[in-house]
Amino acid sequence: MSPFNLVQEPYFGDEWKILICCQLLNMTTHMQVRNILHELFRKYPGPVSMVHAKEDELKDLLRPLGFYNKRAKTLVRFSHEYLTKKWKTARELHGIGKYGDDAWHIFCVGDWKNIEPNDQALNKYHTWLWKCEHA
């Protein structure tokens, strides 16, 4: 764990959960996301359960984050693609942009040296990784 306590850190290596965290962090705060993550991953521990989520239940859980209708549809579609699409990088999946792809490279594939994050928190973490390597 870093001194930054990023939302993704407890899920290191679990690419589906890390990518879900990244999607939830879009247009909201880490505190709001942290407030729902435990329950979300309890109800939907993996992509199969998310694909089969009851839309109304998922929306209710996501309501505190705002944009809950869109978020619910995005998470279900992303999870379906995660399971069925032949993808090589996270950015190829629905709902994943540069931030999610950068986090995937850092937390899932260990390819952090070849990326340049734009996100402030991810950039601090990335710089910390470089410092740890050279310490």
Image (cartoon, rainbow, N blue to C red):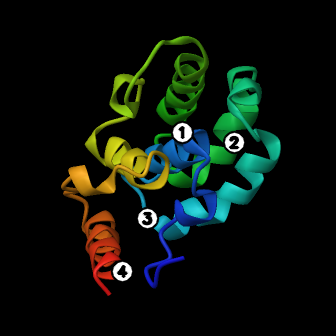
| CA neighbours of label 2 inside 10 A, class few (<14), some (14 to 19), many (20+) | few
Q: Which quadrant of the view contains residue 4?
A: bottom left
Residue at the image point whose x is 54% and y is 25% from the top = 73
Residue 6, compared with residue 106, is above or below; it is: below
Residue at the image point whose x is 39% and y is 54% from the top = 106
Q: From the viewer's perspective, is the residue at label 2 or at label 3 nearer?
A: 3
Q: Measure how far apart labels 2 and 1 are at the Cα level.
A: 8 Å
Q: Secondary structure at mark 1?
A: helix
Residue at the image point whose x is 74% and y is 26% from the top = 53
- According to the picture, the residue beneath numbered tag 4 turns out to be 132
Mark number, residue 29: 3
Q: Which quadrant of the view contains residue 50?
A: top right
> Decide: marks 2, 3 in contact (CB < 8 A)?
no
Q: From the viewer's perspective, is the residue at label 2 or at label 4 nearer?
A: 4
First in sequence, mark 4 or 3: give its number. 3
Q: Measure how far apart labels 2 and 4 are at the Cα level.
A: 41 Å
Residue at the image point whose x is 68% and y is 21% from the top = 51
Q: Measure how far apart labels 2 and 3 are at the Cα level.
A: 18 Å
> Decide: marks 2, 1 in contact (CB < 8 A)?
yes
Residue 39, compared with residue 81, is above or below; it is: below
Q: From the viewer's perspective, is the residue at label 4 or at label 1 nearer?
A: 4
Mark number, residue 60: 2
| Amino acid type, label 3 | Thr
Q: From the viewer's perspective, is the residue at label 4 or at label 3 nearer?
A: 4
